[in-house]
Image (cartoon, rainbow, N blue to C red):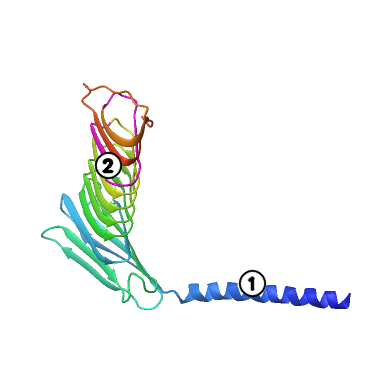
């Protein structure tokens, strides 16, 4: 019996050591990860802005802010080398250029920058990224987004929308503008509207599915897909047009929201 108690005690000791070592390691690793948060604001008197994100592991979020101000929030995280940051504002062309680069990227240690940019609500926005997640919300002007790879997620937009990405999902939610033109090389496209749109184009060029959800009115539908589900009223004479293409996937058209 004493031997059993000793064996059980040894097992419990080992388990406790493993758990405590794991906890300490996670705390140590977290404590060693530096973080640098900064904000700045730039006087802004333009009707449109262009944001270009260059090299580095960068995410970008764009939303509406205060009139007369371009606000930039930046959060850097790194595990070995602090990112080399570039933030250039060209007042003449209303262009903001952002980069956050570390050695040995993209396969090296942690080296990441999160950017949040706020613009006056009615500003027309154009954003271009090489890769990384791209978000936009609560904007009233036109929005044009381009990314080579990475998810693009937009919501609560009141103006026209255009999205182009090479690879990655495109999620566009609660749109209220009359036009949406969304295309990806491969990935998933999901588009939903709060108001009946005039023109919708939702395209996956290679592999992926397309989902379009609109208020219940009649639409002229142009559809190409390996499989399809259409639950909207179709009328070739309607002035409202939906074009949906997923040559190797599924296109789903349904009503919602309005």
Q: Which residue is mark 2?
A: 203
According to the picture, the residue beneath numbered tag 1 turns out to be: 19
Q: Quadrant of residue 253?
A: top left
- Visible in this render: residue 55? yes
Nearer-N-terminus badge (2/1): 1
Residue under the image location 21 percent in, 50 percent down: 125
Q: Is residue 81 magenta?
A: no
As drawn, is 183 to the left or to the right of 107? left
Quarter of the image for residue 51 reads bottom left
Residue 214, magenta (yes or no)? yes
Q: Which residues are magenta?
A: 197-220
Marks 2 and 1 in Cβ contact (< 8 Å): no
* Quadrant assignment for the N terminus: bottom right
Front residue of 68/129: it is: 129
The residue lying toward the viewer, choosing from 45 and 98, is 98
At which x and y percent is residue 10? 75, 77
The residue at the far right in this view is 1
Q: Is residue 170 above or below residue 257?
A: below
Q: Residues within 10 Å of mark 1 (few under 14, many from 20)?
A: few
- Residue at left offset 19%, top offset 55%: 50
Disc 2 secondary structure class: strand
């Amino acid at each position: 019996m004493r031997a059993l108690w000793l064996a059980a005690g040894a097992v419990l000791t080992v388990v406790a050591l493993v758990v405590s070592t794991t906890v300490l390691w996670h705390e140590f690793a977290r404590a060693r990860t530096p973080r640098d948060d900064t904000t700045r604001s730039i006087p802004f008197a333009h009707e449109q802005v262009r944001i270009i994100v260059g090299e580095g592991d960068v995410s970008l979020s764009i939303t509406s802010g205060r009139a007369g101000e371009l606000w930039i929030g930046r959060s850097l995280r790194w595990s070995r080398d602090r990112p080399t940051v570039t933030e250039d504002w060209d007042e003449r062309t209303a262009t903001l250029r952002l980069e956050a680069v570390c050695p040995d990227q993209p396969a090296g240690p942690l080296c990441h920058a999160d950017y949040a940019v706020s613009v006056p609500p009615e500003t027309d926005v154009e954003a271009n990224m090489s890769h990384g997640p791209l978000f936009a919300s609560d904007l009233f002007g036109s929005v044009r987004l381009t990314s080579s790879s990475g998810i693009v997620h937009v919501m609560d937009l009141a103006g026209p929308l255009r999205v182009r990405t090479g690879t990655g999902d495109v999620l566009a939610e609660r749109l209220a503008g009359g036009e949406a033109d969304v295309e990806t090389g491969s990935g998933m496209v999901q588009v939903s509207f709060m108001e009946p749109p005039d023109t919708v184009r939702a395209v996956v060029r290679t592999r992926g599915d397309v989902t379009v959800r609109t208020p219940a009115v009649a639409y002229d539908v142009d559809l190409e897909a390996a499989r399809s589900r259409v639950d909207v009223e179709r009328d070739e004479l309607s002035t409202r047009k939906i074009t949906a293409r997923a040559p190797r996937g599924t296109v789903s058209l349904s009503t919602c929201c309005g």
